[in-house]
Image: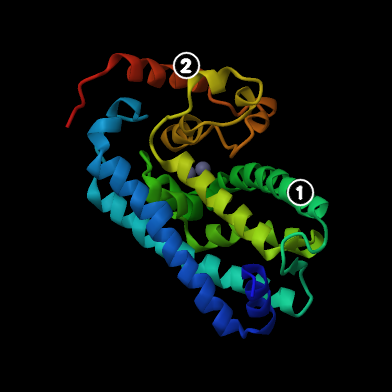
Amino acid sequence: MLFSEQVGLMMSQSSFEQIFIVVFSISILKFIIILCLPYFIFWKWFSKYFWNQKIQQIPRTEPCVSMEIRYSILTLFIQSLFLTALVWGSQLNYFKLYPGFGTQGVASEIVGFFTYFILYDTYFYWSHRFLHQGWFYKNIHIIHHQSLNPTPFASYSFHPIETVITIFYMLPFVFFVPISYEMFFVLLVLTDVGNLVGHLGYEFLPRKVYHSKLGGWLTTPTHHNMHHQFSKSNFGLYWRGWDKYFKTLHVKTESEFYRIKDQKDSVSSPAS
Ligand SMILES: [Zn+2]
Ligand SMILES: [Zn+2]
């Protein structure tokens, strides 16, 4: 039996609890591969090797990292419940997730792919600005902003209410856009990797890509790292256009990128 057929069978015949066990197991794997591994590689084992590409060359305090870990685990649990509800709802035909990549046409998968990122990026910018308003910032989003120098664990260090807000865009997506479980899985992995890159703490994007037509419109790790440092600018996720058009782009975003590139070229001796 093909893998996609197995996925289809599992997704169409499973109870809420069975789906949750699968989804939460994947979340645990995600925690290990997308959060723990990059943390140990870039912040512990090989930090000296990558030091000259570090955005903020200051040490992190352990209590901050353990806070990020605690909130990330809580976020993964809430996300798992939410994703289980989407899969379960699709079994009952409330949502349009279906088994088998391409069974409703490859074109529909491609449309779904781009729709997802346009919707997510737009939703992220505006919901993020909303979370910076008064009460919401002081009581909810402040958890994420405790990480002034974010590590990979900060990717999901959110107040539970923010976790629900950040994944809410998926509801209209799976309600209106037909997409296979396989493509949806790929989208979620890319979303996680995107989050990780923004919170890795290192700027790896080459100058050449930054200078390209596409690179000029995309955010870089420095972009979101500066949001954690200064909090009142750089709200965008992937597309820099939102911050440019709505005048929320930090004036030093570009110079900071070049500062780190120069730092990489000039600093050869790692600090401790
Ligand atoms: Zn962040
Ligand atoms: Zn923020």
In this rendered view, identify the residue nearer to me: 81 or 71. Answer: 81
Q: Please tell me whether mark 1 sits on a helix, a strand or a loop.
A: helix
Whole-percent x, y for residue 264 in the image: 34, 20
Q: Determine the residue positioned at 23% across, 43% down.
A: 45
Whole-percent x, y for residue 96 in the image: 78, 67
Whole-percent x, y for residue 197 in the image: 47, 41
Q: Residues within 10 Å of mark 2 (few under 14, many from 20)?
A: few
Specify the quadrant that holds the N terminus.
Answer: bottom right
Amino acid type shown at disc 1: Ile
- The mark lying in front, picked from 1 and 2, is 1
Quarter of the image where one finds residue 265: top left
Q: Determine the residue positioned at 61% across, 22% down.
A: 216
Figure check: 260 above or below 39: above
Distance CA(mark 1)–CA(mark 2) = 36 Å
Whole-percent x, y for residue 80 in the image: 53, 69
Residue 41 is left or right of residue 259, and the answer is left
Q: Which mark is residue 57?
A: none
Residue ID for mark 2: 255
Figure check: 114 above or below 162: above
Query: Could you tell which of marks 1 and 2 lies nearer the N-terminus?
Result: 1
- From this viewpoint, which residue is outermost toward the left? 272
Whether residue 47 appears in this view of the structure is yes
Q: Specify how the rendered protein is coloured.
A: rainbow
Specify the quadrant that holds the C terminus.
Answer: top left
Figure check: 8 above or below 224: below
Whether residue 168 appears in this view of the structure is no
Q: Determine the residue positioned at 49% across, 36% down.
A: 224
- From this viewpoint, which residue is outermost toward the front? 1
Residue 154 is left or right of residue 166, and the answer is left
Residue ID for mark 1: 110
